[in-house]
Image (tube, helix red, strand yellow):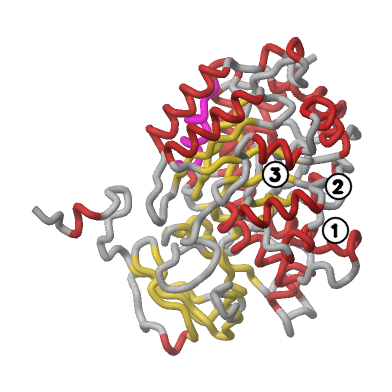
Amino acid sequence: MEPTLAQRQNPRDPQKPGKTLLVKNADMLVTMDGARREIRGGGLYVEGNRIVAVGPTAELPATADEVIDASGHLVTPGLVNTHHHMYQSLTRAVPAAQDAELFGWLTSLYKVWANLTPEMIEVSTLTAMSELLLSGCTTSSDHLYIYPNGSRLDDSIRAAQRIGMRFHASRGSMSVGQKDGGLPPDAVVERDDAILADTQRVIETYHDEGRYAMLRIVVAPCSPFSVSRDLMRESAALARHYGVSMHTHLAENANDIAYSREKFGMTPAEYAEDLGWVGRDVWHAHCVQLDDHGIGLFSRTCTGVAHCPCSNMRLASGIAPVKKMRLAGVPVGLGVDGSASNDGAQMVAEARQAMLLARVGFGPDAMTAREALEIATLGGSQVLGRDDIGALAPGMAADFVAFDLRQPLFAGALHDPVAALVFCAPSQVALSVIGGRVIVKEGVLQTVELEPVIERHNRLAAQLMQMAR
Ligand SMILES: [Zn+2]
């Protein structure tokens, strides 16, 4: 028997008409659609979790179940964060790790992170997501690769579901401890078979491959210097069996390159290719030291890059050749990286930093404000392997944000509010809508009461630092 329409649809995304939402009269609406339209007096009409119409307000339906007047605001697609370690929000500005480069920084922090608990993972994820949401991010990935004391990926997934953020949860891993020549202490690494079994469990439990998915799982061994060759290969095989994306750190700084050459006799890009870690379903964080051969390889294979400018500056890792990558056709998204190496997780600030850092490295025309915003929206969606977020157009997920242009920080820049968003000091959002649901209204998070979360977060952070003494 022919299945009915309802049976054919993804059960997690029933196409019922849903509540309607009209956003009207935005001073400017940035679509990031194929024509990169910017619409004065623009608006959006939403049905359920998706956009039905985008255009000048006069051309949209006049009423809806909920109507939001966006006069005085800039509306953009929700920003997409492609690299983070949310648990690190508990260990910002740790004195011993304030002035170190990557390997020294990691070595100081592993012993602190060894005391993480499931409660700490959940609360720090809530805090990190609040910060991201208020800064315009509507979809985030998180790379959780350390699971001490019974912690599980489920702890961060619970937080995402509670706060209402679109989430790509990475089941990270570390398997090569110090006794085997790796960087992490033996106490925080797991066995290969346990890692693979738990990865399979979370994919089967949570992964939603459907359009408008609120939750996807990613397979994500931490880095070539903390995971065995076999685990890299087997992780790729597992990911591809289930059709989920793959993510790791690559070519972050000069020591990373030296380690790769010494240990594997290859550059990080060659090593990634050798392991099958290139392709449309793969994205690598940092790639600051990706050489021309690596850029060519990523371009041919459509392998994505999460560019993390603040973290790269904080750890003095260098300046990623983003312009070169983009000219070669490499998909590039933006990542705030973990809060221990970029002690702020503000997506607009990250876009601004991407623009400024590109100019320091490669001249004043190395990145425009609009390119930075494109990397932060469309670029991120491409890197995460999605075609339903990152732009405002009919059929896309209803993920968008609004910034109040009447704040002092935008004064004098309103002749170009789009460039102003990136050039001026980073703004928080007045409004955030994810999948048609209002998550931030008038600058206030609607889904979680923040004050008690932050209080609990700070208590747990103090506890964590105490335990490491
Ligand atoms: Zn990272």
* Label 2 within 8 A of ligand 1 by Cβ: no
Q: Residue furthest top?
A: 179
> Could you tell me which secondary element the residue under label 3 belongs to?
strand
Residue at the spot x=47%, y=73% of the render? 393
Residue of label 1:
357
Question: What amino acid does circle 2 point to?
Answer: Met
Q: Which residue is found at the position 80% from the left and 14% from the top?
A: 469
Mark 3 lies on residue: 285
Q: Position of residue 129 (x, y in %)?
A: 59, 45
The front one of 234 and 461 is 234
Q: Earlier in the sequence, mark 2 or mark 1?
A: 2
Q: Total marks drawn?
A: 3
Q: Looking at the image, do the residues carrying marks 3 and 2 touch, with CB atoms under 8 Å apart?
A: no
**Residue 375 sits in quarter:** bottom right
Q: Residue at x 40, y 69 (%)?
A: 395
Image depth: mark 3 or mark 2 in front? 3
**The disc labelled 1 sits on which kind of residue?**
Leu
Q: Earlier in the sequence, mark 1 or mark 3?
A: 3
Q: Position of residue 301 (x, y in %)?
A: 62, 52
Q: Is residue 408 visible?
A: no
Q: Secondary structure at mark 2?
A: helix
* Main secondary-structure element of the magenta-colored stretch: helix
Ligand 1 picture quarter: top right
Magenta stretch bounds: 151-162
Residue 314 visible here: yes
Q: Pointer 2: residues within 10 angstroms few (<14), some, or many (20+)?
A: some
Q: Residue 454: horizontal and vertical position, in percent?
A: 63, 37
For disc 2, the marked residue is: 313
Q: Are marks 2 and 1 in contact (CB under 8 Å)?
A: yes
Residue 147 location, x and y as percent?
A: 59, 22
* Front residue (pair 374, 250): 250
Tell me the distance, in whole angstroms, between the alpha carbons under discs 2 and 1. 9 Å
